[in-house]
Image (cartoon, coloured by chain):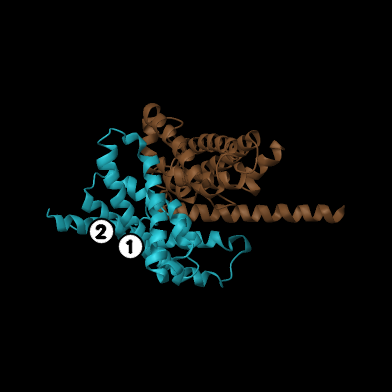
Amino acid sequence: MSTFVLLFTISLNAILAENFILVKFLGICPFMGVSKKTDTALGMGLAVIFVMGLASAATWLVNEYLLVALDLEFMQTVVFILVIAALVQFVEMFLQKALPALYQALGIYLPLITTNCAVLGVALLNIQNGYTFIESVIYGVTGGVGFTLAIVLFSSVRQRLEDCDCPKAFKGYPLALIAAGLLALSFMGFSGFKVF
Amino acid sequence: MNFKKQLKEGLLTNNPVLSQLLGMCSTMAITTTLFNGIGMGLSVTIILICSNVVISALRKLIPDKIRIAAYIVVIAGFVTMVDLLLKAYLPALSDSLGVFIPLIVVNCIILGRAEAFASKHGVLASAVDGLTQGIGYTAALVVMCIIREFLGSGTFGKGVLGADGVRILPAQYPALLVILPVGGFLTLGCLIALTQWINRKLAEKEKEKEAVQ
């Protein structure tokens, strides 16, 4: 299998068949918390794509040249979360200086990304799956794209849920979760979907 | 500190999963068999107690500005310990929970309790808070597991009572859908609705009591 085909398969898997939110259950908190409006959902999604791509690259390099080289792989969790926290902080400072408009748009979502399990999840999964550097970065970015797809789709559903008439106990989160369940059901159609 | 009151809060009125809506990722992802649920619940409870105790003991030493980073380091340390212990002594559990054990680091329950409780209260009170919140989390997981396992594979206690558990429904009836991701969302949605309903009833009762007095 040529490299291009392999990368294509990884991307398609990360976006559809193994969507981070709807199939792997990573990043549910922002998915529920920030999906009330389509604009903010899109902003969050873009921030996540950016950070997931960067985090994949950074953690892969740290793992390969620091942890594996020094035989410290058992420290992965601690080191990765620190790398991600530092990275998010750095991205925040950089955007504030270089692209204030984007920084304004992302607002509070940037710091929140540190505790998004999709980011730490992608770093750990890259190592678990034994991906190379390029594959890791592609997996990170397309995983973020899958996240954005799910959160943007869901935000438009959610806006309608706000006004609907339902039993009092189901108002708010329960109804949102059930709607998310139906969305997950539709994404299940992609599972078992093999490209080559 | 009133232990009974805290336990009630942890289990029902302020349950980390069902009322505070924290830590939903792991709740939905791993609750397919009772074994997973109990294992995850206990791991989180242990980490929660340890990190609450340490953070509460260090609360006057940690500068306010970098507290979140400091909390994350403490939590990550305990998560790594539990991860290594499980790999050594319970490899089956470690395999089936997979990436969700290291992901306890970013489980909002632990960071949430550190920020909301341990950073403001004494060591003993924080330990009790960790225990009661941990029990609440475990209880929510166990209920989810029992429902999903019963509807999804028709068994009870897979992995706890023998490798296949006790069969309740004949093998051709269960709806596989419930153990797939979809089932996680639907079951949790219904459970949260139930909790909201119970909590509303409880609040109404208290109001009535006050009115009578």
Q: Nearer the viewer, residue A88 or B192?
A: A88
Q: Nearer the viewer, residue A125 or B164?
A: A125
Element type at marker 1?
Answer: helix
Q: Nearer the viewer, residue B211 or B170?
A: B211
Q: At x 56% / y 44%, what residue is drawn?
A: B114
Residue B51 visible, this angle: yes
Instruction: Report the side of A69 relative to B78 (left or right).
Output: left
Residue B177: x and y, percent?
40, 53
Subunit of mark 1?
A
Quarter of the image where one finds residue B154:
top left
Colour applied to chain A: cyan
Identified by mark 1, the residue type is Val
| Earlier sequence position, callout 1 versus callout 2 | 2
Residue B212: x and y, percent?
86, 54
Q: Residue furthest top?
A: B89
Identified by mark 2, the residue type is Ser
Subunit of mark 2?
A
Instruction: Report the side of B184 relative to A6 (left or right).
Output: right
Quarter of the image where one finds residue B52:
top right
Element type at marker 2?
Answer: helix
User: Is B94 placed above or below A137 here?
Assistant: above
Residue B84: x and y, percent?
39, 31
Residue B145: x and y, percent?
48, 43
Q: Which residue does the numbered mark 2 point to in the structure image?
A: A11
In the picture, which quadrant includes the N terminus of chain B? top right
Do the residues under discs 1 and 2 have CB atoms within 8 angstroms? yes
Q: Which residue does the numbered mark 1 point to in the structure image?
A: A145
Please rate how many residues cluster around mark 2, counting C-alpha atoms within 10 Å: few if below 14, some from 14 to 19, many from 20: many
- Chain whose colour in the figure is brown: B
Residue A184 visible, this angle: no
What distance separates the C-alpha of mark 1 from that of mark 2?
9 Å
